[in-house]
């Protein structure tokens, strides 16, 4: 199995998203929602959904030389977005998606996603990602792609995501458009 590093995964995910953002996610960002490193006590998610959220966010953006999604508070951010920003039908769709994702994992692997080891989580999530991309053209958003989007938005709205993974300058220098990615090495947070 060829694993890709975080930088490559983020580049590929950004390309796959193609700039299309689920409307409630954009609304949450415009309202200033961002993750918090404070202790998260789930209020909407049940214990299984919370464990799945932590495990899946950590699989999408694992910790390496910088903190991972769970380390910067992304699971709490996801619950907050679903609870406070999503409309009732979107909230129900997301909660059903969590339950269905875990039910499919139990059916295919014999364990819940949170109980799998890191490699099995990666393999299962990769398969679900590929399935979601294949069926993206349907009339409703694919759960896995929405979850991945929330994870990435939450991570890059965190201080470590914006300052340690993206390039950050309080007062940027001269504006230069159309710089090849290879010349700058990382994309800018601001």
Image (spheres, rainbow, N blue to C red):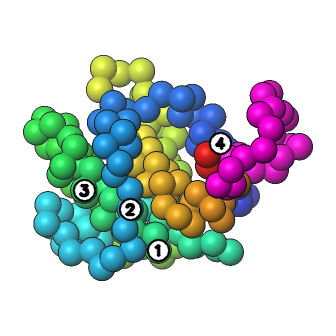
Q: Which of 99 and 88 is in front in this view?
A: 88
Residue 177: within the magenta? yes
Distance in Å between CA atoms under marks 1 and 4: 22 Å
Report the mark closest to the observer, 2 or 4: 2
Query: Are there few (<14), some (14-19), or many (20+) residues within 10 Å of tag 2?
Result: many
Mark earlier in primary sequence (2, 1): 2
- What range is drawn magenta here? 168-188
Residue 140: % across, % down: 29, 26
User: In the rendered structure, which disc, 2 or 4, sits on the residue that comes first in sequence?
Assistant: 4
- The residue pinned by badge 1 equals 71
Q: Is residue 67 highlighted in magenta?
A: no
Circle nearer the viewer, 3 or 4: 3
Q: Which residue is drawn at 68% across and 50% down?
A: 171
Q: Is residue 104 at all visible to an observer of this figure?
A: no
| Mark 3 vs 1, N-terminal side | 1
- Can you identify the residue that label 3 sits on? 80
Figure check: 173 above or below 4: above
Q: Residue at x 17, y 62 (%)?
A: 45
Residue 33 vs 161, above or below: the answer is: above
Residue 116 shows in this picture: yes
Q: How far apart are marks 3 and 4 (CA)?
A: 26 Å
For label 1, the SS is helix
Q: In which quarter of the image is the N terminus?
A: bottom right
The residue wearing badge 2 is: 35
Lower position in the chain sequence, tag 1 or tag 4: 4
The Cα–Cα distance between marks 3 and 1, rounded to whole angstroms, is: 16 Å
Q: Which residue is drawn at 57% across and 29% down?
A: 18
Whether residues under marks 1 and 4 lie with C-beta atoms below 8 angstroms apart, the answer is no
């Amino acid at each position: 199995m060829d694993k890709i590093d975080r930088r490559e995964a983020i580049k590929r995910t950004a390309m796959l998203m193609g700039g299309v953002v689920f409307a409630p996610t954009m609304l949450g960002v415009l309202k200033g929602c961002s993750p918090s490193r404070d202790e998260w006590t789930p209020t909407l998610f049940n214990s299984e959904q919370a464990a799945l959220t932590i495990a899946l966010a950590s699989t999408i953006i694992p910790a390496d030389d910088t903190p991972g999604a769970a380390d910067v508070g992304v699971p709490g951010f996801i619950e907050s977005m679903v609870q406070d920003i999503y409309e009732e039908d979107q909230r129900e769709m997301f909660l059903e998606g969590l339950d269905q994702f875990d039910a499919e994992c139990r059916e295919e692997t014999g364990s819940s996603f949170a109980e799998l080891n890191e490699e099995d989580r990666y393999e299962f999530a990769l398969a679900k990602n590929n399935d979601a991309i294949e069926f993206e053209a349907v009339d409703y958003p694919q759960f896995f792609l929405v979850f991945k989007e929330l994870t990435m938005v939450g991570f890059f709205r965190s201080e470590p995501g914006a300052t340690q993974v993206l390039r950050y300058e309080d007062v940027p220098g001269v504006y230069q458009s159309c710089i090849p990615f290879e010349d700058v090495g990382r994309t800018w947070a601001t």
